[in-house]
Image (tube, rainbow, N blue to C red):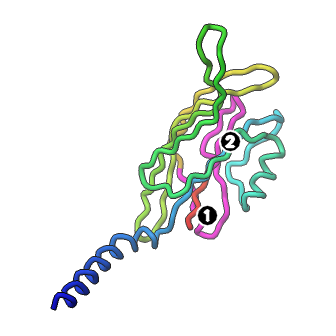
Amino acid sequence: MKHHSIIITIGIFMTILLGVVAPSQAAGIKHVNLAAFHKIKHEYEYEAIVLGRFSSFMAEMEKGSEVIFLNHTADVQNHDIITFNADVLRESLNDGFEDNGVNCSINFTDASDADNTSYSIGGMCTILVSDQGLNKKVHFIIPEADLPDTSQGIDVWVMIYEDTDSGIAFYANVTVD
């Protein structure tokens, strides 16, 4: 009788476990891909949407800009804050330290339901921009922007923000495993 009770208990436990795990596995693991570029050819115009796989996207961007950063965040979930830094710390002339580079905090929202996917991001970045021998820190507030889901069959990157004064543009998409 004890053996039968243990099998039932294991069966109930497995049913509960599968009930909890199955929906998140069915939805897949989401990845946010984010890239920023600095315009190096004044006449170059960023495209709002760039179709194609990653190599096509990079080929388009290399026509008139250079990469500031590329970021791939694995297993992102609703309301996660994606942070990334690529900094240079150095001693300053004022007996302190300077913090130069890229600092971003981006909020991910997953408003998907059973019938549709709906992803968006927004946040803040500070980037040290070097242009023609001049360095300046630029602060960006990236308004919440909708992201495409490349698992829907179309490989696409969308521009989520452009600062025309500094020549910096941010692109993003979501991939799902």
Q: Is residue 23 above or below residue 33?
A: below
- The percent position of residue 18, horizontal first and vertical second, equals 35, 76
Residue drawn 57% across and 40% down? 84
The numbered dot on residue 167 is none
167 lies left or right of 127: right
- Residue assigned mark 1: 150
- The percent position of residue 115, horizontal first and vertical second, equals 44, 71
Q: Is residue 19 above or below residue 89?
A: below
Outermost residue toward the left?
Answer: 1
Residue drawn 78% across and 25% down? 131
Mark 2 lies on a secondary structure that is strand
Instruction: Decide which of 130, 167 is in the foreground and name it.
Output: 130
Residue drawn 68% across and 21% down? 136
114 lies left or right of 11: right
Q: Which residues are magenta?
A: 146-172
Mark 1 lies on a secondary structure that is helix
92 lies left or right of 75: right
Q: In the rendered structure, which disc, 1 or 2, sits on the residue that comes first in sequence?
A: 2
Number of other residues with Cα within 10 Å of mark 1, as a class: few under 14, some 14 to 19, many 20 or more? some
The numbered dot on residue 69 is 2
Number of other residues with Cα within 10 Å of mark 2, as a class: few under 14, some 14 to 19, many 20 or more? some
Residue drawn 82% across and 41% down? 64
Disc 2 marks a residue whose amino acid type is Phe
Does residue 153 show up magenta in the picture? Answer: yes
Does residue 81 show up magenta in the picture? Answer: no
Discs 1/2, front: 2
Image quadrant where residue 11 sits: bottom left
Estimate the spatial distance between the alpha carbons at disc 1 and disc 2, rounded to whole Å: 20 Å
